[in-house]
Image: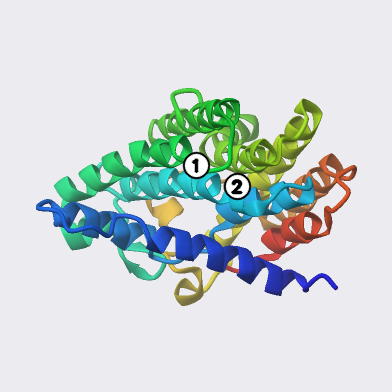
Amino acid sequence: MMPDFQERYDLYRSEVEAYLQGLFVGERPYGRLQEAMRYSLLAGGKRVRPVLSLAVCEALGGERTLALPLGCALELVHTYSLIHDDLPCMDDDDLRRGRPTCHVVYGETMAVLAGDALQPEAFRLIACAPGLSAQQRVDAVRALSTACGGDGMVAGQVLDVDGLAHTVEELRRLCRLKTGALLHAAAELGCIAAGASETQRRQAGVYGSHIGLAFQVRDDMLDVIADQGEFGKPVGSDKEEGKRTFVDFLGLEECGKLVAEETQLAKEAIAGFRNNEFLLALADKLAERRK
């Protein structure tokens, strides 16, 4: 009998946490760098992206152990992006997941370097991932680098910091790049580990992109309505920074409708997956989250 959603999510997340705990643990003369990397990497969080990689792999009949290094590689990239996103030259946030941000604890220089190190370490994980063919590793590198590079996550960050989202459609584009690209990649990495077809990879990517937009819209809503202690980061920070969000353009009620629409589109994209129950439930849970 398949465990319920939360049991399965917790199982995936515990495997991710165990894998991440084993990284950057050796004695080094530059140990403070590794300490800063681990501080941010092991700060908790939902681990949605690597969980998604494991779940997609299993939904398509693959062994999730093969997807684990790939999903964790993406989590390294995600963590580096958060470290840099919190810097004074970016969003200047002092709190992340209920704890002081990396630059607050270790200083700006070490925070920059910790982020710098996490990104190439992600690709080392892929290069050394056991049980995968050379082509699968190449495909995984291509998927992750496309998602986080100059036409992906970093491009979205540029649109964000330069204030280039003046309409709902422009904000959609920003979120598709900054948030959706990594969730698209997380789903695609699970497909690659499972040896899935091009059609399945495309469908999983569409699923990831739609839950990415739903995730960001819900995030904008929580920035207005959430309890800061539960949310884990300052509430109202977007408004203080002068950023226009989906709530500004649409209002809370219409944002709720948009989250529901994007969630439904995500679920439709993977309707043909034989073992899609967890992925369907994941889309719903992310749409309802309170932190």
Q: CA distance from mark 1 to mark 2?
A: 8 Å
- In the rendered view of the protein, which quadrant contains the C terminus? bottom right
Residue 176: quarter of image: top right
Q: Residue 13 location, x and y as percent? A: 57, 65
Q: Amino acid at mark 2?
A: Leu
The secondary structure type at the circle numbered 2 is: helix
Residue sitting at x 60%, y 53%: 65
Secondary structure at badge 1 equals: loop
Instruction: From the image, tell me which residue sits under label 1.
Output: 129
Q: Residue under label 2, please give it.
A: 66
Q: Is residue 95 visible?
A: yes
Q: How is the image coloured?
A: rainbow
Q: Which mark is first along the chain, 2 or 1?
A: 2
The picture places residue 173, in percent across and down from the top left corner, at: 59, 30
Percent of width and height locating residue 260: 78, 53
Seen from the viewer's position, the closer of residues 55 and 227 is: 55
Name the quadrant containing residue 271.
Answer: top right
Front-most of 1 and 207?
1
